[in-house]
Image (cartoon, helix red, strand yellow):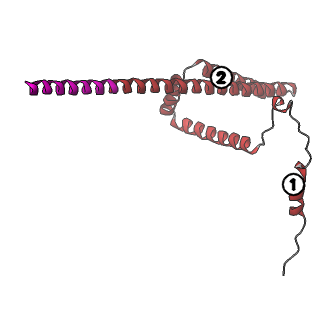
Amino acid sequence: MVDKIDEAAVQRGLAARAEDREHGIDRAKTILTELVDATRTAAETMLDDRKQRAAEQVNVIAEAVRCAAQCFERSDSRAVARYAHRAADQFEDLALRTRNRHWSEIVGDVEDLARRRPTLFMLGATVAGFLAGRLLSLSADRPRTPSRDELEGSDLSPHRGETDEITAAVSRLVTPRPEVR
């Protein structure tokens, strides 16, 4: 009888452990699902922000092309001005479509273009890559200038002793060293 009681207790313990294990697995699945959802939401938010910035940049290009069109009009180059106005309209339309569409729609359109006109797609990708590389290299080469908010309240005048080290280092570089024989 004691053996039966011990065996029943062991069985209940095993069942409880299996139940705890299943509960732990379910909890891990729930946590993983929440993590994936949070990551997806953060990625969509980041992509939407980038999409809005890209639309703003395209709008800036449209404004620049429109200004160029007005310059052509003033210089009596009406045909060129007309083409520039059309190009500005196209840029504005692109900015509007980019701003108002979801990422999945934009990706679908790009995939469709790649299937229908692969040569045009490759040419566009090459040009976009070249322009992105140029823009990135230009922004990396340009020294960052502090904003007005960063400059306000900061003392930019040299303090005693700060310029002495710089002056000494520059003078060591400029002053010729005697040759050692």
The C terminus: image quadrant: bottom right
Say the numbered circle drawn on residue 95.
2
Structural crowding at the residue carrying mark 2, measured as other residues with C-alpha within 10 Å and reported as few (<14), some (14–19) or many (≥20): many
Q: Which amino acid does label 1 sit on?
A: Glu
| Nearest the eye: 47 or 106 | 47
| Left/right of residue 41 with respect to residue 58 in the rendered view | left
Give the residue at x 54% y 27%: 43
Q: Is residue 168 above or below residue 139?
A: below
Q: Which region is colored magenta?
A: 1-24
Q: In this view, does 165 lie above or below 152?
A: below
Kindly give the residue lying farthest to the top in the view shown: 100
Q: Which amino acid does label 2 sit on?
A: Ala
| Left/right of residue 144 with respect to residue 165 in the rendered view | left
Say the numbered circle drawn on residue 157.
none
Res 35 seen here:
yes
Residue 116: x and y in percent read: 49, 31
Residue 153: x and y in percent read: 86, 30
Mark 1 — residue?
165
Image quadrant where residue 18 sits = top left
Kindly give the residue lying farthest to the bottom in the view shown: 181
